[in-house]
Image (spheres, rainbow, N blue to C red):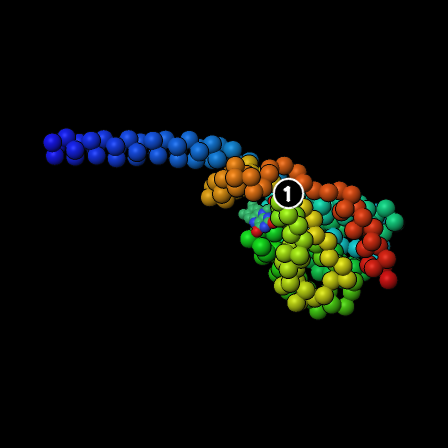
Amino acid sequence: MSSRLISRRRFLKASGIAIGSMVLLRSGLYVLDAYQPVETLPDFRFGENTMSDKVLVTYASRTGSTAGVAEAIGKTLAESGIAVDVLPVSNVGDLKSYRAVVAGSAIQAGQWLPEAVEFVEVHRSELANMPFAAFLVCMTLAMKQGVYRDQAATWMGPVRAKVRPVSEGLFAGALDIQKIPSFGDRLKFRISVMAGVWSEGDHRDWGAIREWSKSLQPLLLK
Ligand SMILES: Cc1cc2nc3c(=O)[nH]c(=O)nc-3n(C[C@H](O)[C@H](O)[C@H](O)COP(=O)(O)O)c2cc1C
């Protein structure tokens, strides 16, 4: 009786381990297979770039959606005849040739990406003496269940503490799980999507991005 009980227990334990491993392996392989690296972050140059009073739009992005927001901001600013460089923060040298700066970052774990924070820190004295605007891109603003604008606005706190922006843009981003490099993060996001917390896809509101960019023109050129 006791040996039957042990063997039954063993059988249940073994089947549990086997089923668990298959589930983990299946989802793990799916997530691993699904990773698609993001191309190098792009530079854009709009307008006649020989002018010495260009505007810099600089950004930090992991999966590319903030790069798209920065490009849209640059294009809109350039419509009024301003020359604009749009560069990842890692490609910015000095700020001497710029009359104004717009800097933005994707949000991860409720924070600007470290290289974007570092950009503001390194250039804080120059930024404090020129028009400086800031934006963030996150999924919280794409959530259907409520209004989280106040929460997202707090993520500008560390930037504000270094240099006060003349304006802040808060934008919904995009969730493309295949582009997230970390296995653990992909798994976490797949689970939150299944749980209905976030939905995959591009939630960027191009109208809102354009409207904010237009509102910047007089602030950056004063
Ligand atoms: C690891 C990771 C952590 C994230 N953390 C947050 C977060 O705390 N709050 C939020 O609203 N969005 C969060 N997001 C969503 C991103 O901010 C959003 O997908 C954004 O559009 C990504 O920008 P990017 O494509 O420029 O990297 C996170 C995304 C990743 C991959």
Residue in the image at 76% along x and 59% along y: 167
Q: Residue flagged by tag 1: what amino acid is it?
A: Lys
Q: Nearest the camera: 63 or 171?
A: 171
Disc 1 residue lies near ligand 1 with CB under 8 A = no
Q: Position of residue 149 (x, y in %)?
A: 67, 53
Give the residue at mark 1: 144
Q: Is residue 204 left or right of residue 37?
A: right
The image quadrant of residue 135 is bottom right
**Camera-nearest residue between 36 and 110:** 110
Q: Quadrant of the C terminus?
A: bottom right
Relative to residue 155, is residue 26 depicted above or below? above
Residue at the image position 52 percent from the left and 39 percent from the top: 195
Residue beneath the point at 64% across and 48% down: 146
Q: Nearer the viewer, residue 13 or 104?
A: 13
Q: Is residue 181 left or right of residue 84?
A: left
Q: Residue 217: x percent and y percent?
A: 84, 54
Residue found farthest to the right:
81
Kind of element beneath mark 1: loop
Q: Residues within 10 Å of mark 1 (few under 14, many from 20)?
A: few
Q: Is residue 18 visible?
A: yes
Q: For the N terminus, which image quadrant? A: top left
Please indicate whether residue 150 sits to the left or right of residue 13 in the image.
right
Observer able to see residue 42: no
- The location of residue 209, given as percent across then percent down, is 76, 47
Residue located at (82% from left, 59% from top): 220
Q: Nearer the viewer, residue 85 or 163?
A: 163
Q: Quadrant of residue 26?
A: top left
